[in-house]
Image (tube, grey):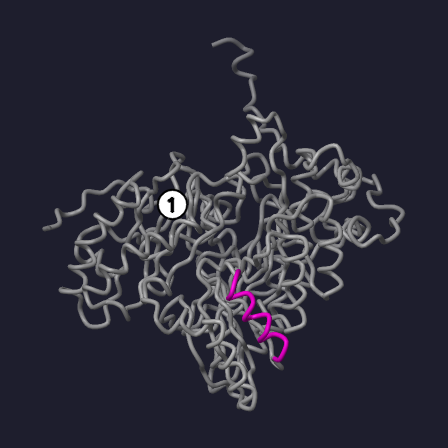
Amino acid sequence: MSSDAILEKPAVKEPSKNEGIKDASHYLRGTILEGLADTSTGSISEDDSQLLKFHGTYLQDDRDLRNERRKQKLEKAFIFMVRVRVPGGVVTPKQWLEIDRLSDQYGNKTIKLSTRQAFQLHGIVKGNLKTTIKEVNEALLCTLAACGDVNRNVMCNPNPYLSAIHEQVLEYARQLTEHLSPRTPAYHEIWLDKQRVAGGDTGSGEEDTTDPVEPLYGKHYLPRKFKISIAIPPSNDVDIYAQDLGFIAIVENGRLMGFNVSVGGGMGMSHGNRATYPRLADLLGFCTPDQVVDVAEKVMLVQRDYGDRTERKHARLKYTIQDRGLPWFRNEVEKRLGYKLPYARSFYFADNGDRYGWSDGTDGKQHLTLFIEGGRVSGQQKDGLREIAKIHQGDFRLTANQNLVIGAVPSSERPRVEALLKQYGLDKTYQHATGLRLGGMACVALPTCGLALAESERNLPNLINELDSIIRAAGLAEQSIHIRSSGCPNGCARPYLGEIGLVGKMPGKYNLYLGAAHNGSRLNKIYKESITNEQIVIELTPIIQRYAAERQAGESFGDFVIRAGYVAAVTAGAVDFHKEEVVAAVAS
């Protein structure tokens, strides 16, 4: 061996391209203003499109039109998706009406309710982008940090039958959103025409922790996105285990005692890359209500400082914890807190779905949860909700399952609401659908998402139509079964927590996953790879029929497919998810 070889040092990985974009952006400004002013194209530069995410918008194009526009030698039909951050998912009727108006005036006349309790407006052309975002803010809503390498929209349980606790939890969601929001004035300069603030990057070489512009984030922000949710047992409707950081409310004798803290969840992965995987969060400990913001900040800062900035596919908190271990992570958090976190307290989750129909609140008011298929509000349904918003005196609550709660309805208002429900057919959506349809979730996918490999939102209703006949024939119409579909493995619809999970592999083909827990506490596992809708129905038919005939009392579909041997249970998290196992032969 030569002396040069002996002295050779391991290569140091370079930061990812996105880190350079953030570094040169002057706190998220980039050349966004110049790009918006360029009328020669409906697009914006590649670097600025990355920065736009921090401002709450994605550059997309209508993929249905790509081939035709290519033939005509036209650029892609560029459009923007604007995501409106709604902490805890609660808006006023007036705000609902404004989102409705914006979707009609500047978008594609639909509203998408996201899986993070946010609004998404699709189909906005560049010339209308600034006006749309400005008018969102005039409605006292905001798009800042709805996307990007920062803390995203903080979710919480819109639980209508525990509204007293919900109001407390909602306040913590709002506090977390405010405290962890970026401080750069770039957003107000670009979208709200505020005068540019002098200063910014001091060039002093100070640590990010003392950055004068971004005291929490620094000029490089986080390695990747960061997601927080708050759950109120027994409902896990916010899928707490899928979040980077979760707070599980501990309620005793009607009092909020504090929160169990969970860390390290995340859904995204890449096909064929076993180094990527979905991961469920671990319990870190317990904190009191007054410690929530402090704990959230310190957890996020550990990820800021130790998350992988060289490989974005390895940059989420789940990989930091998986690589370094939970004891190490707890020690780092507690060092920054200056105190220890006690052990997590006992709790129980029953399911991770929504409770449909009317329910009584603790304040004498009533709440109605409506089923919104795929989270897409359009057509007659949209018209009906507009009319309800005009007379409604309470609020609207977006759920993490893409549904909608008409909240805090006074008894005197209910007859008028019910009349409008009937007039516009809104009551049929939850009264007559099967438990399978009511348990469905789908990401947008085609035609607007640039990452989509297959259809999702436009495909799932048709697939459920096929499965519904089998479900009804088997006597399972009322049985809750969670089916989730994503057009790519990034998992925006949290498909790896579906008792039946579909993940797009290529146009018209999906990987079929089975066996997640009905309460969101266990991942599913791949059952069949790269199959069509027709094949999915063929595969699921005998399983559904066996479930109807052989299920035990109270046994969920996800538990049954494991007991019957169709898939092995994922019990060791990331290691187990990709593990190839021989499952016992299943009798037909």
- Look at the numbered disc 1 and give the secondary structure of its residue: strand
Residue 389 drawn in magenta: yes
Q: Is residue 511 left or right of residue 397?
A: left
Q: Position of residue 143 (x, y in %)?
A: 67, 56
Residue 78's image quarter? top right
Q: Give the residue drawn at x 17%, y 66%.
A: 551
Residue nearest the viewer, comparing 200 with 467: 467
In the image, residue 303 sits, relative to residue 517, either above or below, namely above
Neighbour class for label 1 at 10 Å: few (<14), some, many (≥20)?
many
Residue nearest the viewer, comparing 311 with 422: 422
Residue 302 drawn in magenta: no
Q: Give the residue drawn at x 55%, y 25%.
A: 71
In the image, residue 146 sits, relative to residue 391, either above or below, namely above
Return the residue at label 1.
503
Stretch of the chain drawn in magenta? 378-391
Q: Give the residue drawn at x 21%, y 58%.
A: 544
